[in-house]
């Protein structure tokens, strides 16, 4: 089967992008969960991500990079295996411009030329060792959907919410909304959360899910920035599971490790776990020092240029 991969990418340090965003939203970055520097910072993750991709999954047919009228300076756009997709090519006019990845993710299946079988990743989601297509798709062609058990954490968060009055964070609220929508439609509630790394999809299933939940999705089309009523993309995993169009696989952090870049101890955990996937997760808690350390780590981990990078002039 032909398998493509899709990335979202933004350079939040670009003055022109900053000016467009500020003019449209009327807001500056404020350090909150949904509006912090870490949400838009470019630490060259995509460059090292493509190095890992070429090294560990050379069978990928094509790379699509969805941006907001931006192109990485180091990217060799003449390479026939990569295409930069401006968000206006896939988003409805009412949703543009969009500074909300949760909204953009509802329209990935509309990318022109995208293969039926495709992978999706944020630029901070990395392969750590060689993988074959059957890591992502079963012999019957259906996607392998990776979730993480969260029973204890769910109980802890529920206690904090109901007893201590601590509100759920944006990420948890949007996950719960997706799960509730699927439960209402199919009668099954999925408690597992995404493994926060590279996920596999069928384009036809994504289209089917978008059409099924279009009344709800249409209500968030004007969410140019993240809002509490966003619908998390896990709905494109939960719905196929409910329809028996995907294979559930429970994983732990020893398979798919979410690396919090502000937590220095995670460098040691990454070495010990040696997972298939790891995510270098930036956030409102990270500092510029944490980001520099992460970039240095990635440069050391993936030192060789990929075919996707401009080569030095001789």
Image (cartoon, helix red, strand yellow):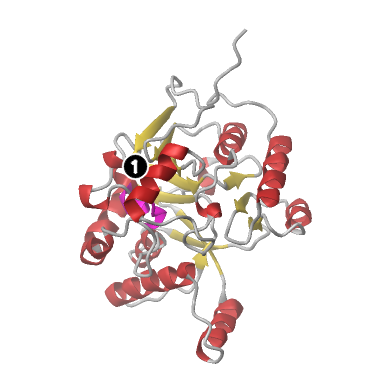
Residue at disc 1, secondary structure = loop
Pick the quarter of the image with the N terminus: top left
Q: Where 14 falls versus 271 (above or below)? A: above
Image quadrant in which the C terminus is located: top right
Assess disc 1: are there few (<14), some (14-19) or many (≥20) residues with their C-alpha within 10 Å of its C-alpha: some
Placement of 64 over or under 162, stated as above or below: above
Q: Which residues are magenta?
A: 99-107
192 lies above or below 129: below
Q: Is residue 194 magenta?
A: no
Q: Which residue is mark 1?
A: 116
Residue 99 x %, y %: 38, 51
Residue shown at 48%/71% (left/top)?
172
Q: Residue at x 59, y 45 (%)?
A: 126
Q: Residue furthest bottom?
A: 163
What residue is rendered at 71% in x and 38% in y? 301
Q: Judge from the rendering whether residue 37 lies leftward or rightward of residue 231; answer left or right.
A: right
Number of numbered markers:
1
Q: Is 271 on the left-hand or right-hand side of 283?
A: right
23 vs 11, left or right, is left
Can residue 102 be found in the magenta stretch? yes
Q: Residue 279, image x and y in percent?
A: 60, 52
Query: In front here: 189 or 35?
Result: 35
Q: Nearer the viewer, residue 147 or 221?
A: 221
The x and y percentages for residue 199 are: 48, 52
User: Which is the main secondary structure of the residues drawn in magenta?
Assistant: helix
Q: Residue furthest top?
A: 314
Question: Who's the residue at 22% across and 52% down the image?
Answer: 94
Of 221 and 225, nearer the camera is 225
Q: Up-down: is 306 above or below 254?
A: above
């Amino acid at each position: 089967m032909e398998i493509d991969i899709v990335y979202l990418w933004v350079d939040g340090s670009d003055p022109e992008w900053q000016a467009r965003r500020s003019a449209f939203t009327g807001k500056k970055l404020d350090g909150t969960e949904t509006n912090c520097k870490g949400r838009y910072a470019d630490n060259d993750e995509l460059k090292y991500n493509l190095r890992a991709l070429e090294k560990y999954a050379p069978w990928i047919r094509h790379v699509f990079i969805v941006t907001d009228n931006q192109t990485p300076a180091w990217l060799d756009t003449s390479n026939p295996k990569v295409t930069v997709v401006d968000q206006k090519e896939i988003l409805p006019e009412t949703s543009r411009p969009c500074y909300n990845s949760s909204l953009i993710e509802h329209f990935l299946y509309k990318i022109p030329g995208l293969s039926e079988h495709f992978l999706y990743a944020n630029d901070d989601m990395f392969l750590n060792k060689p993988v074959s297509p059957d890591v992502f798709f079963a012999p019957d062609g259906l996607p392998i959907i990776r979730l993480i058990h969260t029973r204890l954490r769910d109980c802890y968060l529920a206690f904090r919410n109901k007893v201590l009055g601590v509100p759920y964070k944006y990420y948890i609220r949007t996950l719960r909304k997706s799960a509730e929508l699927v439960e209402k439609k199919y009668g099954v509630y999925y408690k597992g959360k995404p493994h926060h790394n590279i996920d596999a999809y069928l384009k036809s299933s994504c289209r089917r899910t978008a059409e099924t939940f279009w009344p709800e999705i249409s209500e968030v089309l004007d969410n140019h920035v993240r809002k509490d009523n966003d619908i998390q993309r896990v709905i494109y995993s939960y719905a196929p599971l409910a329809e028996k169009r995907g294979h559930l696989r429970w994983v732990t952090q020893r398979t798919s490790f979410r690396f919090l870049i502000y937590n220095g101890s995670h460098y040691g955990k990454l070495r010990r776990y040696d997972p298939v996937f790891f995510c270098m997760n930036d956030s409102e808690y990270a500092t510029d020092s944490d980001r520099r350390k992460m970039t240095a780590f990635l440069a050391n981990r993936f030192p060789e240029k990929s075919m996707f990078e401009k080569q030095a002039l001789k």
